[in-house]
Amino acid sequence: MSKRVNLREFQQNLSNRMHDKSRMGGRLSMLGVEIAGQNYLVEMTDVSEVLSMPSLTPVPLTKPWLRGVANVRGNLYCVADMAAYMQQGTASGAISNRLLLVAERYAFNAALLVERVFGLRDTSRWRRDEKQADLYADEQNVVWRKLDLIGLLGQPEFLQIGV
C-alpha cells in the first residue's frame, strides 16, 4: 500500500530541506523576485510558501494596495500588492504573478503579491554595496535589493489597512 502524503507536510518538508541547504557551508540562499520591474531578494526563512495567484475576495474600505483576501487551504491571508504598497504601480495580473506567504513564525496571515519569482539565488559571491547594505550586485552586475520582511511587518503603514 502506498504511503499517502499530505500536501502541506510535503511543502513543509521541501521548505525545510531548502533552508538546510541554504545554511550549508555558510552560504546564504535567497529567493529572487521581481516587484515593480526591480529585482529583490527575500530570505527563504521568511517565506513559508510560494503560490500561483488564487482567486481573491475584495475587502471594502481598505488601502488600494490591499488586493483582497485569499483562502489557502482554509486559512485566510491578506494579499498585499507590493508594487502598489511601494507606490510604484500595481502588479500586472499576469500568469507569472506569485504570492509569497509570510512564514508562520511571524504570526501574520499575510501574503505578498510579486510580479514573478526567479528562484533561489546564492549571494555568497555577490558584491554588497558599502554605503547601502541592502544592495547586491550579481556576477552580471545586475542590482538586487534585499526586502526586509521583518521591517515591513513592523511598519505602521503596512499594519493599518483601513482607509
Image: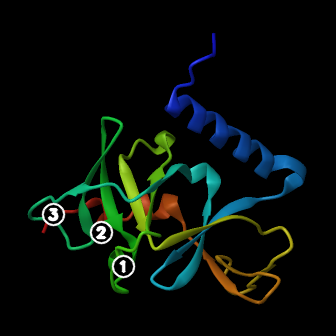
Q: Which residue is mark 1?
A: 92
Question: Which label number is shown at residue 157?
Answer: 2
**Between marks 2 and 1, how big is the CA–CA gap?**
23 Å
The colour scheme of the drawn protein is: rainbow
Where residue 12 sits, quadrant-wise, is: top right
Q: Are marks 2 and 1 in contact (CB under 8 Å)?
A: no
Q: Residue at x 45, y 51 (%)?
A: 101
Number of marks in the image?
3
Under circle 3, the secondary element is loop
Under circle 1, the secondary element is loop
Where residue 114 sits, quadrant-wise, is: bottom left
* Residue 43 x/y as whole percent: 63, 58
Near-viewer residue (96 or 32): 96
Q: Nearer the viewer, mark 2 or mark 1?
A: 1
Q: Nearer the viewer, mark 2 or mark 3?
A: 3
Point out the tag, 2 or 1, that comes first from the N-terminus.
Answer: 1
Q: Which residue is mark 3?
A: 162
Q: Is residue 154 visible to us here? A: no
The residue type indicated by label 2 comes to: Glu
Quarter occupied by the C terminus: bottom left
The residue type indicated by label 3 comes to: Gly
Under circle 2, the secondary element is helix
